[in-house]
Amino acid sequence: VVVVPLIAKLPGGSPVLGFLLGGALIGPNALGIINNVNAVKHIAELGVIFLLFNIGLELSFERLQAMQKYVFGLGFSQVAVTMLIAVWLGVSALGLNGPGAVILGAAMALSSTAVALQVLQDRGEASSRHGRATFSVLLFQDLAVVVF
């Protein structure tokens, strides 16, 4: 609760980043206030459900149809290009084997929908052209998680 306002007041700070940092601090690998991760796992899953609900509120079938070029064109391009670059770097620079490089590439191709959407909303850019394009890419990334 203390970290959220501190991070939100920083330039480019967001309440979501504050909550992420606060959660990392109280977790078992930092301050250790919460040691039993399985005990709070269900609460974390509720957070994911609420996030998906929020995305569902913003996205009607008509809006998805209107955005399909961005979602499946721009979104697919971002995931594919980022994944290919990360796989290439994993193999050539880090010496990873094929499956390890693919896992690295998949992880690097995805970003946090919660953080990106909150930043767009905080800046009032969610309904702008680049905000809609960003939302489309994030939506495709969320769909790509099912494949990975």
Image (cartoon, rainbow, N blue to C red):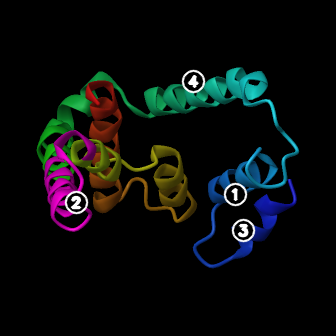
Badge 1 density bin: few <14, some 14–19, many ≥20, Cα 10 Å:
some
Mark toward the start of the polypeptide (3 vs 2): 3
Q: Secondary structure at mark 2?
A: loop
Image coordinates of residue 41 in percent, x first then y, are: 69, 25
Mark toward the start of the polypeptide (1 vs 2): 1
Residue under pointer 2: 95
Q: Is residue 33 magenta?
A: no
Eye-nearest disc, 1 or 4: 1
Q: CA distance from mark 4 to mark 2?
A: 38 Å
Image coordinates of residue 25 in percent, x first then y, are: 77, 55
Residue under pointer 4: 49
Mark toward the start of the polypeptide (4 vs 3): 3
Q: Are marks 1 and 3 in contact (CB under 8 Å)?
A: yes
Q: CA distance from mark 3 to mark 2?
A: 37 Å
Q: Are marks 4 and 2 in contact (CB under 8 Å)?
A: no
Identity, as a three-letter code, of the amino acid under mark 1: Leu
Magenta region, main secondary structure = helix
Identity, as a three-letter code, of the amino acid under mark 4: Ile
Q: Secondary structure at mark 4?
A: helix
Q: Residue at x 63, y 58 (%)?
A: 17
Residue under pointer 3: 7
- 74 sits to left or right of 40: left
Image coordinates of residue 45 in percent, x first then y, are: 62, 24
Eye-nearest disc, 4 or 2: 2
Eye-nearest disc, 1 or 3: 1
Residue under pointer 1: 21
Mark toward the start of the polypeptide (1 vs 4): 1
Between 22 and 31, the one lying in front of the other is 31
Q: Secondary structure at mark 1?
A: helix
Residue segment shown in magenta:
80-100
Identity, as a three-letter code, of the amino acid under mark 2: Gly
- 82 sits to left or right of 40: left
